[in-house]
Image (cartoon, rainbow, N blue to C red):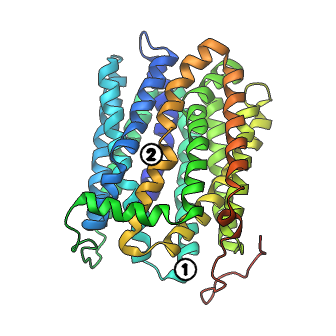
Amino acid sequence: MARTASLLGSGFGRVAIAFAVLGLPGSTPVHLSVVIACQTLPTVLLVLFSGVVADRYPRQRVLVVADLISALAWAGLAALTFANHGPLVALMALAFLSGVGTALFGPASTAILPELVPNERLQTANGLLRIGQNTALVLGLALGGVAVALIGAGSALAVDAVSFFVSALLLAGLRLSWRTQTADSPSMLQDLRLGWHEFISRQWLWVVVVQFSLVAAALSAYIGVLGPLAALQHLGGAKAWGLLAGADALGTVAGATLSLRIRPHRPILVAVLATFVLGLPVLLIAWAPLWTTMIAMFASGVATDVFSVLWSTTMQREVPGPMLARVSAYDYLGSFALAPIGIALAGPAALAFGTSTALTACGAFVVIATLGALLAPQVRQLTAPNTLAPGEGTTAGSA
């Protein structure tokens, strides 16, 4: 319920922040690139620290603090938008603060799930969790563009702030028995070293993280800057971008539902193959009709959640529980290390070479990175347990 509530608000925020920044006096695509880059930067700077914290302290408390930080940040962004006065430094600071909340939330949210469900139900639990989140995101994104057009970006940002407060209240009621996982470790630095050893010892893990680092850089540039710009230039603006984002979110619901049924024998291979689809809307948005790009966004959403559920479940099964938050932190860091660079370059690239050329380059990055990942033997060969929990669906096939 908590994650569903926060994702409902994030649907509004994801659409609103681009148009809020672009709508402020004197703003340019470069300003938007800088603000969105500041939002993703804490993932690079703080996520390893967050993983250690989530292995040392009750993960429920870490999640509550993360949500409260995000709520305050989005409330500040809404206030600046309402005032129609957003100094770049203030926008950067608040965007950075929202990224701090995201960085704290990520590793703890991944690591807490095995404390709630048995190992054989992890994929089902991940799938159900994603269905709830993505259903809320569909509503948030579909309504976000309309809300920006009718009542303004400030109101949409305020909805996002409220959703994080609601999420924090719900998570505060979660009660789990907790035993410190790293009591024998003398320092946080030693914790990080142990986590790095667990991470680098698994070829499938670090190879896919490197792959997704390139993919995420391209997709972040698309979602944060180039996509809204293309919507403004070719498709009519905020309402069209809201429809595209909603189609993507609707696809993630379908993808999460599909992930409840499939049990691939080689889950990482299937997950990596799915990422080819993520480049389709990036390549289409600048020249294709709206309905065609919406179909591509839907397909991309399906692929995103098939990847996410298979990836999260495999990591939760393969990595020991006491190390899971730290290994997850290295996953977050590696996967999104290049995202701020992609976003920061997106605005200048659009101005220098044109939006269409920049989008083509992003699509090429997705394809090349995925082909590279398929060269690793463990990516192609890692197999999943052949067990199903009582009452779960039958296997839909194997890779």
The disc labelled 1 sits on which kind of residue? Answer: Arg
* Above/below status of 296 relative to 198: above
Q: Which label was assigned to residue 372?
A: none
Q: Is residue 330 placed above or below 22 in the rendered structure? A: below
Q: In what quadrant of the picture does the C terminus appear?
A: bottom right
Q: Quadrant of residue 295?
A: top right
Between disc 2 and disc 1, the foreground one is 1
Q: Residue at x 24, y 59 (%)?
A: 188
User: In which image quadrant can residue 321 be found?
Assistant: bottom left
Residue 394, how many percent across, how many down? Answer: 73, 82
Q: Nearer the viewer, residue 372 or 358?
A: 372
Residue 308 location in percent, x, y? Answer: 59, 59
Q: Residue at x 35, y 19 (%)?
A: 88
Q: CA distance from mark 2 to mark 1?
A: 28 Å
- The relative height of residue 49 versus residue 176 in the rendered view (above or below) is above
In the image, what residue type sits under mark 2? Answer: Gly
Question: Looking at the image, which residue sits at the far top?
Answer: 26
The residue singled out by tag 1 in the image is 121
Residue 9's disc is 2
Q: Position of residue 229 (x, y in %)?
A: 61, 22
- SS for callout 2: helix
Crowdedness near tag 2: few (<14), some (14–19) or many (≥20) residues, C-alpha within 10 Å:
many
Residue 378 horizontal/vertical position (percent) = 65, 66
Name of the residue lying farthest toward the bottom: 390
Res 156 seen here: yes
Query: Height in image: 33 above or below 184?
Result: above
245 vs 43, left or right, is right
Please give left or right for residue 65 compared with residue 26 in the image. Answer: left
